[in-house]
Amino acid sequence: MKNWIGRLLGGTEKQTAAEAPGGVALAFEDDQAMAAEVHATYYRWLTASSGATASPEQEAQILREVNSLAADPVCASGLVPRIPELISQLLTALSDENISTGALSAQVGRDLVLVAEVIREANSAYYRPLTPIETLEGAVTMLGLNGLRMLLARIAFRPLLRVTVQGVARQVAPVVWKHAERSAFAASVMAPGLSAGVFEAYLAGLMQNLGLQVAFQVADRICGGKVPGSSEFGLAFFAASRALSSVIASHWDFPPDVVEAIAQAGESDGPNLAQALAQGDRIAKLRLLLDANVIGADDPLITQGLNGFQRRCLGKLQDLSG
């Protein structure tokens, strides 16, 4: 597990920009309260079919056990699947920036499912090719080295978040994965304006929900197939699960700045990468709430809570599939 993280990050410099619209501060004064409302609204929607009134003792026990797992990263990381070996091998190849398109195509071509994923990605609304791309080599050329690394990271994380356990964790897994994909994309878009690494932001976005899936397993067990439905608990639950994600990331030898970003994404004065992740997380949650018709495009959470650049990113997320 640790080796593939190094392969994923090896050989590519951070992509940064001195200034960009993504780094513009929000105009209103109480940004923390606005962010909390986004998280609370998202939690209520995410748990709508499994939320229940829980006793204070149950809520405290859930948070206590999640925090205990954060103190035992070996145990916590054992509750999630492993990375496929082929993905690990491909990430090793991608650490060499001088590798040819033909060589990459040959390695990707060893797995027909992966070939389909790469061609599908190259023809997605994000890349918008002038004519449909039908060959693997053409798809690899379209994606480029960084685009292929992001795609492989997404493929690697998919089985980690699409858990096979039963109960609430399985029920929410598809939405949690959709949020991870969109959060990773949005964080990578926000990163240049904050002089943060684009791929590091993408990786942090994918990783931040891993602890949440483990935390849902804990809540399901304590509440007998349900989870506490209150907004107050939801905010504490998200914070505890984010800390758990950070601990697992550290145990897997993620770069320190990615670990730090996950841990501090909820803090207004966190490092630049954490701010990019926090912005991406919020935009992704708003996208899912919009798509589910929980809020409208004229909701203050969007019109007052996002600047123009962030709203454009919100619109771009509509093009993502999965």
Image (tube, rainbow, N blue to C red):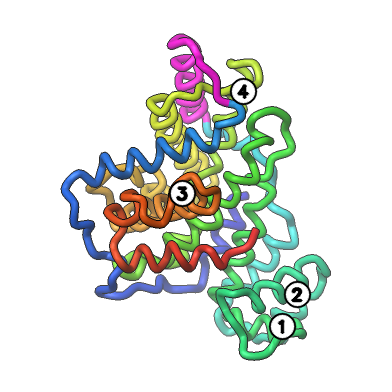
Q: How far apart are marks 4 and 3 (CA)?
A: 22 Å
The residue beneath circle 2 is 107
Mark 1 neighbour class, 10 Å CA radius: few under 14, some 14 to 19, many 20 or more: few
> Mark 1 near mark 4, Cβ–Cβ under 8 Å?
no
Which range of residues does the magenta coloring cover? 51-72
Q: Distance between the residues labelled 1 and 4?
A: 46 Å
User: At which x and y percent is residue 104?
Assistant: 69, 79
Secondary structure, mark 2, is helix
Q: Distance between the residues labelled 2 and 1?
A: 6 Å
> Which of the 4 image quarters holds residue 22?
bottom left
Magenta-drawn stretch, dominant element (helix, strand or loop): helix
Going from N to C along the chain, the mark reached first, 1 or 4, is: 1
Secondary structure, mark 3, is helix
The residue beneath circle 3 is 285
Q: Which residue is drawn at 35% across and 54% down?
A: 302
> Mark 2 near mark 1, Cβ–Cβ under 8 Å?
yes
